[in-house]
Amino acid sequence: MAKFNGFILTEKGRELLAKGLAGEIITFTKMAIGDGTSLTSERERTTLVNQITTLPILNINVKRNGTCEINALLTNKSVTTGFYIKELGIFAHGNDNVEILYAYNISTSPDFVPPFSANNVVEIEYVDTIIVDQVANVTAVIDPSITYITKKYADENYLVSSRLAEILGLEFGGNIQDIGNKTKGKFYYDSVTKFYYECIEDNSLTYNDSGKFRAISNKPLSDKVENLFKFGKDWVSFPNGLKIQWGFSIAQNGDDIVRLISPFKSSDYQVVACDSGGGTYITGMTPLTNETFKACGRDPYTLAYKSFGFRWVAIGY
């Protein structure tokens, strides 16, 4: 496995970083590899010593610690003459679209890339960390024709998330840090916070903005709970339409009409009650309409109608 010293920002890279901190967008365009040996310091380089090929960028991941992970893919499918990977370069541009060598890296123990053959197929994914400080807008040029992703990336970012989407009944949109448009109503994974977020406004950001995303770690569940039950004053309804309501009323002269707290769909419901005087009255409840029921109360000894207070519960749809 090759060993590298680590990426050093070039002078041009430092100038672009300063522009980015001032508000410009930094766009990473490509990674390049070569087999040259630099005789000058990394900071002074403006090109690779001997560039062999460029690598398409697969993905970028902007982190909160002032760094950015860049994924690029090297294959030897077009290599006819083997070479040692002695130098790496990351290229970028600002608002002026002038591409510069942003960062440069040299190997102390280079890998050999053999020419392509049926017995020599090489695919190397580079994951390199680049300094971007606190630049607000960092993006990359990603070739949409490149469909390669690693198994680890697929497992972590899509298979698990797709299963989660099935459970929550939501549509998974990908990673927040991925380049591309984010769609309102879909949910996205933040590889920095390791949480899922709902996109609440269409955007193309590669970082988590609270004005564009809201955490859904608990949100889908709470939404589902809210939709399961609806509450009002002295009533509750369920997803299948069943409603339970309750109250306290007084039947004047033992024969009165009581209005429900909330109307039912029809008069086909049930009302039960007990008097508030310790069970000393015979009570009877009869639904009249979807909004009212009749309450009757008699003295258990004389069977005469008498005014009484009672607590009632009505169940229907």
Image (cartoon, rainbow, N blue to C red):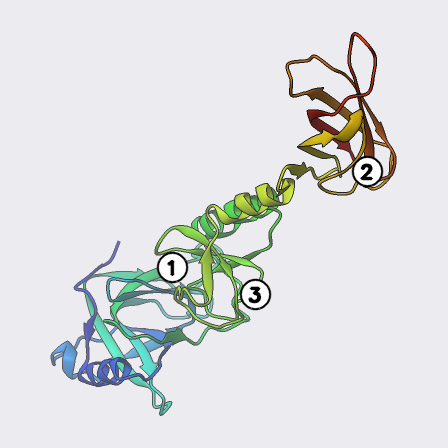
Residue 119 found in image quarter:
bottom left
Q: Nearer the viewer, residue 3 or 234?
A: 234
Kindly identify which residue carries mark 1: 125
Kindly identify which residue carries mark 2: 292
Q: 300 left or right of 157?
A: right
Q: Residue, x 63% and y 37% (percent of image)? A: 234
Kindly identify which residue carries mark 3: 184
Q: 86 left or right of 286?
A: left
Q: Is residue 68 above or below residue 255?
A: below
Three-letter amino acid code at the position of disc 3: Lys
Residue 166 found in image quarter:
top right
Instruction: Give the structural element (helix, strand or loop) at label 1.
Output: strand
Instruction: Give the structural element (helix, strand or loop) at label 3.
Output: loop
Q: Nearer the viewer, residue 224 or 142?
A: 224
Q: Residue, x 43% and y 67% (percent of image)? A: 211
Q: Residue furthest top?
A: 301
Q: CA distance from mark 1 to mark 3?
A: 32 Å
Q: Residue, x 11% and y 78% (percent of image)? A: 41
Give the x, y percent position of residue 30.
37, 75
Q: Residue, x 69% and y 34% (percent of image)? A: 245
